[in-house]
Amino acid sequence: MKRTLYILFLAPLCVLSILTIVYLFSKDEPLFFLKNVKISGVSQLSERDIMGRVTPYLKDSLLKVDIVKIKEAITDHPFVREVRVKRAYPFSVVIDVKEKVPSALWVKNDGDIFVLDESGEPYRKMGKGAVKGLFIINAKEKADAASIFREVNAWSKEGIMKKETLSEVAYNEGNITLFGLDDGVEIILGKEDQRKRLKRAVAVLEDAKKRGLLIKCIDARFEKGAIIQERKG
């Protein structure tokens, strides 16, 4: 009984002490005066970009900051996958941004270049900040580019090929041609059984390497075997 009374007495006293300290430090300012905004997770965006979007929803008091509106304002940016926003008492707002990941480049038939995210969706044009190490997809339509992106990822996950060695995929009316893989080799897959044809082409390429042959092109559009073109010189 005595212990319970002691706790009931001590708890309000602790809260009162904390509020007193806060008051002493901020008696000339609003309660929980907002002093800083901490932003993390941005690389394609800048902190200035984020602040430009959230400033209308920042208030003098941390208690009056509209967390929901801040989150919506940042999430609406096409570069952003998701965002977490929280109050960090007594003086801060913390914003953790998860940007979309540049995963491939899509070249349209008019020459415009777009960056594809990890889902294969275009989310921004190619800008000054060039992204390195991404393979290129040449396709007329956005749906075709997304489909090729998913196909390449499936082949890579299955271990048929390494996506990192691929430099370009050309798509035209269902026909697929790969460039890269090994010293810029061109692999023609055509329209049908592309997974099966790719496996066959990779096997042919591996065999050619063992024989010391330099391959320029492998045409895998044949039910049995493939036609190879050696690199001159």
Image (cartoon, rainbow, N blue to C red):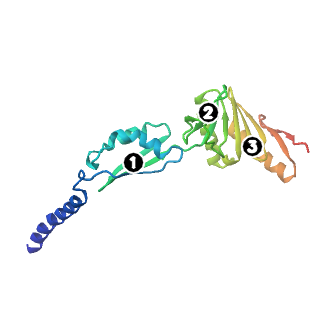
Above or below, 52 against 211 in this view is: above
Amino acid under disc 1: Arg
Occupied quadrant, residue 147: top right
Local secondary structure at mark 1: strand
Q: Dividing the image into 4 quarters, which one contains the N terminus?
A: bottom left
Residue 145 x, y percent position in the rendering: 61, 33
Sequence-earlier tag: 2 or 3? 2
Foreground tag (2 vs 1): 1
Q: Residue at x 50, y 45 (%)?
A: 46
Above or below, 28 against 16 in this view is: above
Amino acid under disc 2: Ala
Label 3 to label 1, Cα distance in Å? 39 Å
Label 2 to label 3, Cα distance in Å? 18 Å
Q: Which residue is mark 1?
A: 84
Residue 210 x, y percent position in the rendering: 84, 53
Local secondary structure at mark 3: strand
Name the one closer to the observer, 105 or 220. 105
Q: Which residue is mark 3?
A: 180
Amino acid under disc 3: Gly
The crowd level at tag 1 (other Cα within 10 Å; few <14, some 14-19, many 20+) is some
Number of the label disc, if any, that sits on residue 145: 2
Sequence-earlier tag: 3 or 1? 1
Q: Residue at x 83, y 41 (%)?
A: 216
The crowd level at tag 3 (other Cα within 10 Å; few <14, some 14-19, many 20+) is some
Name the one closer to the observer, 132 or 168. 132
The crowd level at tag 2 (other Cα within 10 Å; few <14, some 14-19, many 20+) is many
Occupied quadrant, residue 221: top right
Foreground tag (3 vs 1): 1
Label 2 to label 1, Cα distance in Å? 31 Å
